[in-house]
Image (spheres, rainbow, N blue to C red):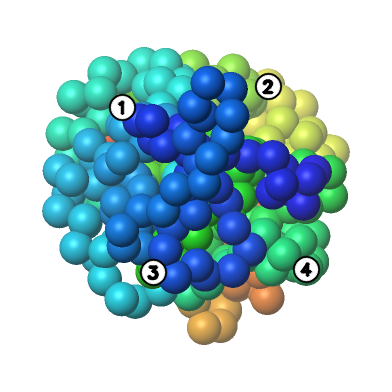
Amino acid sequence: MFNKILLTTTLIVGSLTLVGCWSQPTTWETQKVVEKEVVQVEAPTPWSITDIVVATEWVSILKDIVVSLELTDMLSSSWPYTVFAPTNEAFTNLLAELDMTYDELTADKDILKTIVQYHVLEGKVLAEDVLAMEEGDTVETVGGYSFVISNKNDVMVNDSKVISTDIIASNWIVHLIDKVLVPAPVANILDPEAKKTIAARAMDSGNYPTLIAAVQAAWLVDMLSEEWPYTVFAPIEEAFATLLKELNISAEDLLADTDLLKKILAYHVLPGTYSAEDVMALESATEFKTAEWSSLTIDPNNGTPKINDSMLIDVDMFTSNGVIHEIDTVLMPSS
């Protein structure tokens, strides 16, 4: 549990051990072991968040990234920050998941900065503040993206476990986590699947057999493979089963009518790339012109967005030429 970890967690820094504290000390309380005896020593000045990150071997990869992005001044400033610091193992696991090298991950400084900022909150957030949050509360980071706090059993930030808490700095506090936090749009960009085209990603997933058969029958594979960016709303299999029942036709009948197929499929395609964040940023229900030339309505719907009457199931499957969002209903143009 989060509150039990507080009393036992320490950070080894060279010959010193930094102790997580509940209140801001005037100097860092430290310990060092001398012939199996613990003695108290004092660092000469309070340590900033940058000082802690730079001096701590467990987060040396984060340190290298912070230095390379020239964020040391920000994390040394007098402005209070709360940092959720991933361990080296967390970064190693991320590279394995993405099938990337460290150099590949750090090559794009904009993406890297977005990832780092996703671990930083403005203000002071102690362990007790996290424990007081409601299950599923979201917290906005300095980069503008939000993550979800869960404290039902272990304390989680998105799907990362908090493993050490309340390491107090002069400017304010560090918590250790066991997984690198990556905002969804960036995660999808880094995903190896995102290098594929819309057509290739949908076909390779195996999740949309009827949709893919329809795209192939309507000769739309080339369109969804070209460089022009598109947003595709992909109906799940159950959606096509429902449509066939409503139309009282078989899948073979639907696939045979290529003119109808083209109109239906093109109605699921928007020119341009619209992420889930773009959808949620809409102030109200908004019409968008589709590739079929008629319009559909996207409604943010107080956090449960709808495309016409269809609900979004899965979002932000980014590709080299746009993005796929999964929906629960086949969209039908008025014509």
SS assignment at label 1: helix
First in sequence: mark 2 vs mark 1? 1
Number of residues whose C-alpha sits closer than 10 Å to that of mark 2, classed few (under 14), some (14–19) or many (20 or more): few
Looking at the picture, which amino acid does disc 3 mark?
Asn
SS assignment at label 4: loop
Q: Are marks 1 and 4 in contact (CB under 8 Å)?
A: no
From this viewpoint, is residue 6 visible?
yes
Q: Are marks 2 and 3 in contact (CB under 8 Å)?
A: no
Q: What numbered label is drawn on residue 171?
A: 3
Q: Quadrant of residue 81?
A: bottom left
Residue that label 1 marks: 195
Looking at the picture, which amino acid does disc 1 mark?
Lys
Looking at the picture, which amino acid does disc 2 mark?
Glu
First in sequence: mark 4 vs mark 2? 4
Image location of residue 177, percent across then percent down: 55, 40
Q: Quadrant of the N terminus?
A: top right
Residue that label 2 marks: 252
Residue that label 4 marks: 132
From this viewpoint, is residue 119 visible?
no
Residue 283, above or below 50: below
Number of residues whose C-alpha sits closer than 10 Å to that of mark 1, classed few (under 14), some (14–19) or many (20 or more): some
SS assignment at label 3: loop
First in sequence: mark 3 vs mark 1? 3
Q: Quadrant of the C terminus?
A: bottom right
What is the CA distance from the residue labelled 4 to the residue labelled 3?
22 Å
Image location of residue 325, percent across then percent down: 54, 46
Front position among marks 4 and 2: 4
Q: Is residue 319 left or right of residue 258?
A: left
First in sequence: mark 2 vs mark 3? 3
SS assignment at label 2: helix
Front position among marks 4 and 3: 3
Looking at the picture, which amino acid does disc 4 mark?
Ala
